[in-house]
Image (spheres, grey):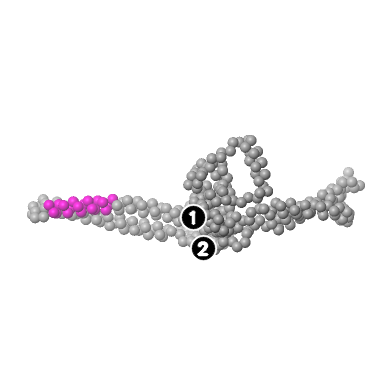
């Protein structure tokens, strides 16, 4: 038995819609009012971004790396360079609890000057919320408390937050901050773009600039870590060599002062021995000092340079929410849903022979 093919009669659908047009005059105004009630109290948010290009060099690869980068490939991680952290891994850094917690002590100030505190306190106590959602938040908190006991103990200040072991409230606070900070890296050019979203435009700009500085400091500390360790080691050796040289000089001076007029060969030999030892200590101190200066120069050599392509600015207009688009979108969805509901029988072929 062949299955009968069902065709949708567009003319009949149009007639049904014309007969039921009253449903549109009732539904769409209701949807419009409800959409406005929901979206208008939503807090505005602003965005600020910064783009910077880090110094990125490899020991080998040369032209091959340049050609590969034009096709979206990075050969730096294939053994041609000495870095273990590449720009493509920087976004992962912004998901690190240690990095997020390090941002808590940043001093922020709102554009109207009413709030001036650290970022931890600002996010914890000075964030606006939609009052419409208050009953839903209370209900969610009540339902959650029925199944588990909430850990209400949280840090009183930014200095009290332990990234290794945080309370539940501090953990959710960290997740909120992670959602506010976005880091992207262009695979072809390695240009880093940091975007911060916040309810206040000045806070967004301040945090963007601070996050950019923290990222640069992290990269500098990583790139110069080996040279700094070497410099600290040579500094220890230089201090020890200087101490030995001063001790040898003091011993030589005391001996010469106490045997100023001596002509015995034993005394002369002893004085020459002390003078030789003093000269050796001086040579050791001079050589180590030279090595120390070389290590300090190595630190400067390994310190990367950053070119800021786009500086953070205070946004003059909010980035969202797009209230008009939201209302229009909800009305459009309601209209489409109502239309499909009214002609559902014609679409499904219900009641047709």
**Pointer 1 or 2: first along the chain:** 1
- Spatial CA distance of label 1 from label 2 is 14 Å
User: How would you classify the magenta stretch by its main secondary structure?
Assistant: helix
Residue drawn where x is 84% and y is 51% of the image? 343
**Camera-side residue of 272 and 237:** 237
* Above or below 233: residue 141: above
Q: Which mark is residue 118?
A: none
x and y percent of residue 215 in the render? 50, 55
Residue drawn where x is 70% and y is 51% of the image? 38
x and y percent of residue 205 in the render? 55, 59
Residue 349 vs residue 206: left or right? right
Q: Can residue 86 be seen at all in this image of the molecule?
A: no
User: Pointers 1 and 2 in contact (CB under 8 A)?
Assistant: no
Q: Which residue is mark 2?
A: 308
Callout 1: helix, strand or loop?
A: helix
x and y percent of residue 74 in the render? 54, 57
| Residue projecting furthest to the front | 114
Callout 2: helix, strand or loop?
A: strand
Q: Which residue is mark 1?
A: 214
Q: Quadrant of the N terminus?
A: top right
* Above or below 191: residue 127: above
x and y percent of residue 145 in the render? 62, 37
Residue drawn where x is 36% and y is 56% of the image? 295
Query: Residues in magenta?
Result: 240-258
Q: What is the crowding at mark 2: few (fewer than 14 residues within 10 Å), some, or many (at least 20)?
A: some
Q: What is the crowding at mark 1: few (fewer than 14 residues within 10 Å), some, or many (at least 20)?
A: some
**Camera-side residue of 293 and 137:** 137
Residue drawn where x is 55% and y is 62% of the image? 313
Residue 88 vs residue 330: left or right? left
Does 44 appear in magenta? no
Does 253 appear in magenta? yes
Q: Can residue 328 be seen at all in this image of the molecule?
A: yes
């Amino acid at each position: 038995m062949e299955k009968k093919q069902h065709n949708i009669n567009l003319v009949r659908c149009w007639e049904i819609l014309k007969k039921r047009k009253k449903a549109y005059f009732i539904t769409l105004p209701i949807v419009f009012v409800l959409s406005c009630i929901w979206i208008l109290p939503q807090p505005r948010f602003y965005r600020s971004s910064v783009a910077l290009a880090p110094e990125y060099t490899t020991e080998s690869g040369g032209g091959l790396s340049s050609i590969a980068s034009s096709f979206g490939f990075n050969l730096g991680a294939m053994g041609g360079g000495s870095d273990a952290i590449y720009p493509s891994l920087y976004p992962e850094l912004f998901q690190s609890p240690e990095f997020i917690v390090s941002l808590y002590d940043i001093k922020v100030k709102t554009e109207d000057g009413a709030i001036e505190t650290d970022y931890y306190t600002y996010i914890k106590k000075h964030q606006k919320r939609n009052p419409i959602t208050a009953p839903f938040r209370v209900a969610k908190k009540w339902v959650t408390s029925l199944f588990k006991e909430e850990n209400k103990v949280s840090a009183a200040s930014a200095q009290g937050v332990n990234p290794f072991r945080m309370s539940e409230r501090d953990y959710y606070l960290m997740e909120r901050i992670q959602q506010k900070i976005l880091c992207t890296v262009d695979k072809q050019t390695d240009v880093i773009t940091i975007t911060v979203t916040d309810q206040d435009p000045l806070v967004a700009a301040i945090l963007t600039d601070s996050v950019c500085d923290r990222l640069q400091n992290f990269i500098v500390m990583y790139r110069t870590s080996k040279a700094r360790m070497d410099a600290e080691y040579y500094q220890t050796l230089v201090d020890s060599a200087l101490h030995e040289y001063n001790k040898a000089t003091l011993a030589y001076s005391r001996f010469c002062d106490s045997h100023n007029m001596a002509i015995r060969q034993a005394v002369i030999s002893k004085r020459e021995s002390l003078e030789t030892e003093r000269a050796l200590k001086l040579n050791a101190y001079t050589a180590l000092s030279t090595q120390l200066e070389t290590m300090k120069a190595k630190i400067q050599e390994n310190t990367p340079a950053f070119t800021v392509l786009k500086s953070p600015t205070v946004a003059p207009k909010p980035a969202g929410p797009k209230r008009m688009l939201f209302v229009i979108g909800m009305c459009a969805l309601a209209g489409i849903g109502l239309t499909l509901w009214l002609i559902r029988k014609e679409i499904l072929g219900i009641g047709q022979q």
